[in-house]
Image (cartoon, helix red, strand yellow):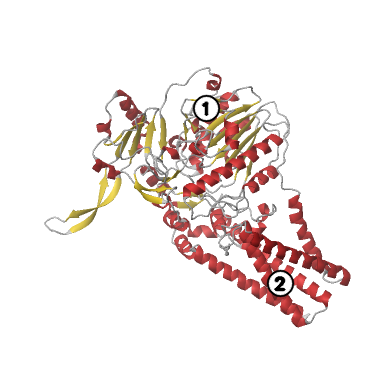
Amino acid sequence: MHAHKLLLFRLTYLTIFWIVAQIIFFMIHYHVAGLMDSLASSPMRSALWKPVVLLPLLQFIVLQLLAYMVFVAFIYFLTISINAFTKRSHSTLQMLGISLWILSIISLLMMNQALYPHSFFAIFPQLSSHSIFMYFVILSLGLFFAVLTLLAYYACLRMKQYRLLGLFFLLLSVIPILDLFNSSLTGSSSPSSKPHIIFIGLDSLRPDYVHFYNKSAQPTNAFDQFLKTSQVFDTAYTPLARTYPAWMAILTGRYPKENHARINLSDADAVLKNTLLPRQLQLAGYQTLYATDEPRFNDITEAYGFDQVIGPKSGAAEFLIATLSDFPLSNLLLRLSISRYLFPYQYANRAVSHTYEPNDFLNMLARQIVKEPNKPLFLALHLCLAHWPYTWASSALNENALSALRYQASVNKLDEQFGKLLIFLEKAHLLENSMVVVFSDHGVTLGLPNDRIINQHSFQGDPAQIKLLPIYQRHDTATALSNYALDTSYGQGTDILSLKQYRIVLGFKMFGMNLPGKRLLQIASLIDIAPTVRAYLHLAPVPAASGLSFYPYFFNKFSHPIRPLFIETADTLADITTENIMVEKVFRNSINAYLLNSRTGFLFVNPEAMAAMIRAKERAIFTKDWLLARYPANTKLKLVKKPHSSHLILESVLTPPVYVLVNLKTMAWQLGQLHSLIKNPETQSLAQQFTAFYGSEI
């Protein structure tokens, strides 16, 4: 027994050393010390001690330690069982245990490399995740440990020793076996007299990357097949190109200025005062369900009118745990569906891109939907695969590849995920009598030519004025060359003249109606979705809604008058308007803007920072022919000469707001003060509506 205790101590010490080594390497790679310093010096430092943050962190740490305890116990069980069966000496016992421990660590690293090539601990970069050699090694080690495990169980039965420990691991082995029989998408739905309503939001999907809209784009078979039989708007926009404001525009039918969702992580208390579509549908007898694979910047909860919310857990704890979760053993455990209970902040979480697999979220959705009998369903889904960083667990491109190439790959994968989702909905009988609305919450710009609607050649005016506008670095994916240009930008909700950040996919399909597919010429917005759904269900419209119902337009009954649309930016932090986004840098420069709701555990922008962000917003109004944009007043440093001296000093100078007027037919554009640009009744009307809508904000 002394030899057994010595073996257990040695295995434990080796494992502790391995854990410490992982933490050190992880902290160096992710600059954790710098992140912690930023957190410690911010108003958020006290949030770490709140139960809504501290308890999930402790749970995460305890589960990590328990996993390693089970790992040590398994190596110990194999060693003592095989050593007793072969009747080797005590010295052989120690050698065998240490050898098995080393082989186990190698196995963990190799499997982590194969399943998660973007993990920090994918430490064999020369080995591709599809390498034959890698799979040969993993298969060999797997067979080796399988034979040892069977031999250990045989020793338990024959020698009648260590049976309790053997039974424990036998029960654990049932979990992955059950997963093999519980990994396919299934579902069922009982019929309802009212139609189901299904929203499918596709984060960051640009229409020009969908083959249906752009015939030169790569094939997107699932999107194309759905859209060609739908009522599709050729031109549709989001009022604000960020996820939470976009969804609030959908659920309220109002602009961000009206519903108070002016940025991601807005204070929910003000937003929840709106009339929300899910609440109306609850009153109309609907079961309401929301599901997303990335809740980080879109904290939609049951308070918005949903009976059930499916997806990774969200809140301040998710930011910390998801950032600190790249360790081989827990990474591998995420392949088991039981991990949605063990690691609820990481499992099927798109924000943890190195472990995210699209099917995990679909399987979670299929397992967790609890359909109430004889009730129609309102199902709101949001898929984030096409969002930055445009990689996932098994993606072939790493984060060093150009963002445009990674984005294209993520769109292709999203198309595949969307196709599987439709198959699930069909099997669940949710497509027999329903309205399905497919939309992107916003687009994105990738540093490509023409990502912005302006360029040097179409400018009308003094070229020296152009320096008043920000200019971004442009990348050519064909040559990998870059230069600074006026016709491009990066991000979403960061530049008002980058309409590709605001242009969206939008299609309605009524299953159960014999309505042929149609491409609609009217310009639509996300604020039109809720009024259109209400008209489809014959619900009373909301008086405060700014959106229009396009439901009669599907049947050619009437055409809406031409109306202007309003769009605005969110925060335009310089750290996110670049090709290579450094997460730790964004974190350091933005952490002071957030506070913690200690009741819900969610982060929100503090009022002072929100007021500053609203003042700094770029805003625009546009119709089919014209766009009028306003860049806010800006503080710049300028070299000026001191009075009565030849010395130069740096002085802060407040530059006045700048307006940009773009003719969307000719793409000719001008900039200057508002009064100098307005030269005809049409642009004068545009300016008046713009000033009336934004009022004291401009």
Q: Which mark is residue 100?
A: 2
Residue 59, percent across and down?
Answer: 63, 60
Could you tell me if residue 539 is visible in this image?
A: no
Task: Specify whether 138 is left or right of 522.
Answer: right
Marker count (numbered): 2
Compared to residue 76, the image places residue 623 above or below, namely: above
Mark 2 secondary-structure assignment = helix
Of the image marks 2 and 1, the number of the one nearer the N terminus: 2
Task: Determine the residue positioned at 52% across, 45% down.
Answer: 408
Q: Which mark is residue 542?
A: 1
Residue 380, percent across and down?
Answer: 60, 37
Three-letter residue code for mark 2: Leu
Residue 670, percent across and down?
Answer: 29, 35
Three-letter residue code for mark 1: Val
- Along the line of sight, which residue is nearer the eye, 306 or 293? 293
Residue 451, percent across and down?
Answer: 41, 41
Compared to residue 138, the image places residue 458 above or below, namely: above
Task: Determine the residue positioned at 76% across, 73% down.
Answer: 79
- Along the line of sight, which residue is nearer the eye, 312 or 397? 397
- Along the line of sight, which residue is nearer the eye, 600 or 327? 327
Could you tell me if residue 68 is visible in this image?
A: yes
Q: Residues within 10 Å of mark 2 (few under 14, many from 20)?
A: some
Q: Residues within 10 Å of mark 1 (few under 14, many from 20)?
A: some
Mark 1 secondary-structure assignment = loop
* Mark 2 or 1, closer to the camera: 2
**Quadrant location, the N terminus:** bottom right
